Amino acid sequence: MILQALDKAYDRFSRQELANGKPRVPPYGYSYERISYALVLDEAGKLLDVEVVDAGELDVPSDPTITRTSAIEPMFLWDKTAYALGLAPVVKKRTADEHDAFKKHQCELIGESDDAGLRALLGFLYAWGPSPDSLPRYRDELIGTNVVFRLDGEVGYLHDRPAAREVWLRHLRGKPAHTGHCLIRGERARISLTHPTLGGVRGAQSSGAAIVSFNQEAFRSYGKDQGANAPVSEHAAFAYTTALNDLLRKDGPQKVQIGDATTVYWAEAAEENAAAAAEKAFGWLSQPPSQEQLNTGETDRLRTEVMDRVAEGRPLENPELNLKKDTRFYILGLSPNAARLSVRFWEATTLGKIGEAFHQHWQDLNIEPQPWRQPPAIWRLLTRTAPARRNQKGVAKYDTKQIPPNLAGELMRAILSGRPYPRTILSNALMRFRCDHVIDGLRVALVKAAIVRGMRMRDSDLPKEAYVSLNHDDPDAAYRLGRLFALLEKAQLASIDGINTTICDRYYGAAAATPARVFGFLIKNSKNHLATLRKGRGAKWVRNPAATGGWLDREIGAIHGGFSGSFPPSLTLEEQGRFSIGYYHQKYARREDLPDDLKADIPEAGSDDTEGDSND
């Protein structure tokens, strides 16, 4: 299914044009390569000039069945200077072997062709002696780069000439190959024993990695060799790898990093405008525009329509803007695995289902006060499962290198399928609360999402407002304990000026996991804090300590009284999650729910006191 979808994507990409007028992907037997210089020859093969190639990447002949590694493999009508000219930054014995192989390869393929350009190249190679002094100019800059050839007086390069293309395709067709039934296209064709490598996956080998490979004896079946174990035609192997390499290219618009998973996505529709609109929509949903982008006007009608419809739960359907909910959509997450690539997740769905999935995801995350202005990107949520530390200014920074492996794929699958969030989301967030005491809004929102989605799986009638905002009437013991802990911390902060370490820093882990061990002591200690406030003393920001102390005393007493003097000996993971939600709701309670003195100490909704949110 993955390879078939990529094969179809190649057909679509081949019909698209780049800004320079070339197809988005090269035709079979060609690849886009960075070319720096062109050697200008006369018809006799004399080198007249060296020109800079401004186009950057050109489509040049490339055998899709060959991957250049340590073996000497020359290209046709282009190559790096070690092959084409026998010139390298450091000339070795191998350099001469590479140049000899290049000359032999050109002679074998061109043969008796009467094309003037091809004959000129042979004349050049017969007469050329590898020496930088023989170059008209760019002697130092040219060495080590890729070069092509051009016949003087003509605009195109030798590899673009019709005769050159005919020679090259005849060479590819004439190579010996196995034939078999292609599993992608369902046709009998030449089978590719090795598939072209893929680049652009973070952490993978720089030389490229394979998504299909039979490079070990243990992978063989019934004595079949390499790719014959799962036959894919040469054309299909070229198509799916070329399409995927295009999606994986650096700064590609259909590529996003989600944890350790390099993620690409594409659409399939009868109309190109519908596919393009769907791809833009998913890009905004997976990584919503930042507030800075919105403030600078970097938005458009389509983006606004997509974000509003998903937020409100309306279908992603607007023919005027080419939004069609039935547009087929594919999402592929890849991660490195030595010389191979692992598929972290794969979803074949529709644009409409994606909109529904993200709406439910945002609903599950929703918590008040909201710690974001725009819905958080998926990679940003993943950072909250990593360890955090606060700097001297009290700002938290997350160690994204310690995001649990495989979690990106599990989270993405849960979002797109509507299935429960991975258990590790809940356990990791709770562990981080205990270890680094950074209880920020995004972490709590993740916990709330995991708990609420699990509850909804068991009870489809669960109201969507469950655990969104502070609920004074919630009878759940764990939730009320979280609220109580926040009030006890507030009493401590209000009574002691300039305090650096609060009860949250010292006792949060124990209070959330084993309440009976610490709450008795904390309640007893809070009486001293409340007594200080009632005497008219407290932190400088408290304008009316007595009134503040009275309010806190009533709130603490109301919750404490509900436990009849005994607290639960331990809390389950879900209960610890509800504890954190209650703590967050009470600590960042709406200002209208608080007395005037405490309003000054409540951060504004959306304040997160965190840094390090970068998709690295």
Image (cartoon, rainbow, N blue to C red):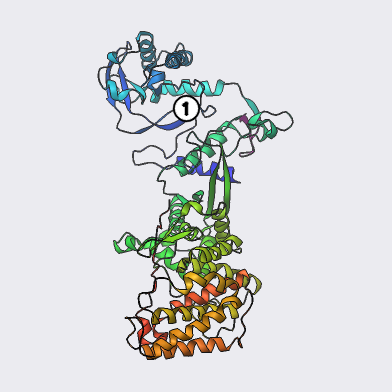
Q: Position of residue 417 (x, y in %)?
A: 59, 60
Q: Position of residue 499 (x, y in %)?
A: 38, 74
> Please, is residue 92 above or below residue 178 in the view?
above
| Residue found farthest to the top | 127
| Residue found farthest to the left | 137
Position of residue 180 in the picture relative to residue 493 (left or right): right
The residue located at (30%, 64%) in the rendering is 295
- Quarter of the image holding residue 180? top right
> Please, is residue 337 above or below residue 595 in the view?
above
182 and 194: which is toward the camera? 194
Q: Is residue 471 visible?
A: no
Position of residue 539 in the picture relative to residue 586 (left or right): left
The residue located at (53%, 53%) in the rendering is 329
Q: Examine the structure image and report whether residue 185 is included in the region drawn in magenta.
A: yes
Position of residue 87 in the picture relative to residue 580 (left or right): left
Q: Position of residue 153 (x, y in %)?
A: 27, 20
* Span shown in magenta: 180-191
The residue located at (57%, 49%) in the rendering is 344
- Quarter of the image holding residue 461? bottom right
430 and 301: which is toward the camera? 430
Q: Is residue 529 visible?
A: yes
The residue located at (60%, 76%) in the rendering is 517
Q: Amino acid at mark 1?
A: Ser
> Please, is residue 534 above or below residue 223 in the view?
below
Crowd class of label 1 (few under 14; some 14 to 19; many from 20; radius 10 Å):
many
What residue does disc 1 label?
Answer: 62
135 and 430: which is toward the camera? 430
Q: Position of residue 421 (x, y in %)?
A: 58, 63
> Please, is residue 116 above or below residue 312 in the view?
above
Q: Examine the structure image and report whether residue 129 is included in the region drawn in magenta.
A: no
**SS at badge 1:** loop
Q: How many marks?
A: 1
